[in-house]
Image (tube, rainbow, N blue to C red):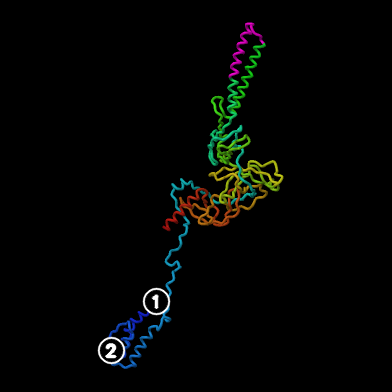
Amino acid sequence: MRRGVILERQAVCSRRLSADFRRIASSLLLRIPQYPSSSLLALLGARRKYSVRKPLVALAASLVLAGCPKDSKQVKEEPPPAASTSHEGEGEHDTIPKRAKLTKTIVDEAKIQWQPAKKEVLAPTLSLPGEVVADPDKSARVSSPVAGRLTEVRFKEGSSVKKGDALATLRIPEIGKVRAAHSAAIAKGAAARANAQRLEALVEKGMAAKQEAVAARAEVDALDAESKALAEQLAALGMGTSGGGADLVLRAPVSGVVVARDAVVGQPVTTDQTIASIADLSEVWFLARVFEKDLGKLDVGAGAEVALNAYPTETFDGRIEYISRQIDPAARTVTARIRLPNRAEMLRLGLFGTAHVVTKSEKAGEPALVVPRNAVIDVAGKTVVFVHVGPEEFELHEVALGEAAAGKVRVLSGLREGESVVTSGAFTIKSVLLRGTLADED
């Protein structure tokens, strides 16, 4: 590339020699014809063809040659223009608008609600660690009443089942024996009944001893009791007294979700083995651990706000419905049970978290400006609330938050008392603002 620049410069200088020489020579009263600019020697040789004085020609040639570099070292390569990294000509970066204007239809459909911000005394709270468990009254374990072998499995872990749904089929050879014994007892009972009736008739005619008739009736009653017991045994296994076969169908004892499965076709099953666990997870328990020193601060019915490690931005509201009567001797804690609705099926068994429980207040604190926790959202990395400023018009306020308790959070700055804060439907307003920003960029 450098060699190309040098050659180009030399060609430019060569083209300028003829014009510059004529101009200088003309000023010296020399009459120089047009010569090709590619050869300086031809131009200098013109002095022999014309009667000119050597000093003038030498002067003109020296002046012209001075304007051209003698070798390639005098040619400096011009650096290419650097790419511009400035933002000249670009507009300012778009920012999220501060106001959103909605239609009345959107406000009604999104159920947007607001209420004035006011000062309240935040109740003191106690943080208690714990985990999510299923309600034992809404849970069940599926097992077989007799030993057998699985021939069919009709459920999967995570499947939703209803009470009475068939889950699996077992082949149990003993069932055939029970059915056979039941049928035999019924047949013997019928024969014994007919014999007892015959003997009773002979007794009335004096042709048979009464003792024989009594013994025959006792045999009938015994066979009836045996057949009834066998029928109850079949019913306990979920089998009818009629029909044949040795298959037993296991059914769901409760409605819910299969949270565990231990069943494979061909697997032998015993009476102490659980092949499925079912739980109704519409509501769950949060078992919080309370230390001895904090036991006197809690009451049954106290409000609680549970934050789980899996959902750091979500909270679940509930109340303490029971405090254990027995202390764990190893951890020196008692269990406080908090019932939680399983919102959007987010709660899963075994999740760890912390319950912030309202405690008995010994003395009232200072009132502070507070808003409901669900009024605070995140927009572009900023903590904000929306304020209703006019008919279907809302304004974004960036706020700084303080401590929180029982579903409310303290506002340190960014909001004034009495301003109407959106408490429901804030995400709809956020979507409108972000959609407007994207439209401006397009």
Residue highlighted by disc 1: 5
Q: What residue type is labelled 2?
A: Arg
Left/right of residue 124 with respect to residue 371 in the rendered view: right
Q: What element does badge 2 sit on?
A: loop
Question: Residue at left 62%, top 34%?
Answer: 271
What x and y, as percent, mark residue 129? Answer: 64, 48
Quarter of the image that includes the N terminus = bottom left
In the picture shown, does residue 1 fall above or below 380? below
Most common SS among magenta residues:
helix
On residue 31, the disc is 2
Residue 372 visible within the image: no
Q: Which of 406 and 202 is in front in this view?
A: 202
CA separation in Å, label 1 and label 2 = 34 Å
Q: Nearer the viewer, residue 208 or 231?
A: 208
Q: How crowded is mark 2: few (under 14 residues within 10 Å), some or many (20 or more)?
A: some
Among the 4 quarters of the image, the one containing residue 45: bottom left
Q: Give the range drawn in magenta.
A: 187-210
In the picture shown, does residue 53 fall above or below 161? below
Among the 4 quarters of the image, the one containing residue 78: bottom left
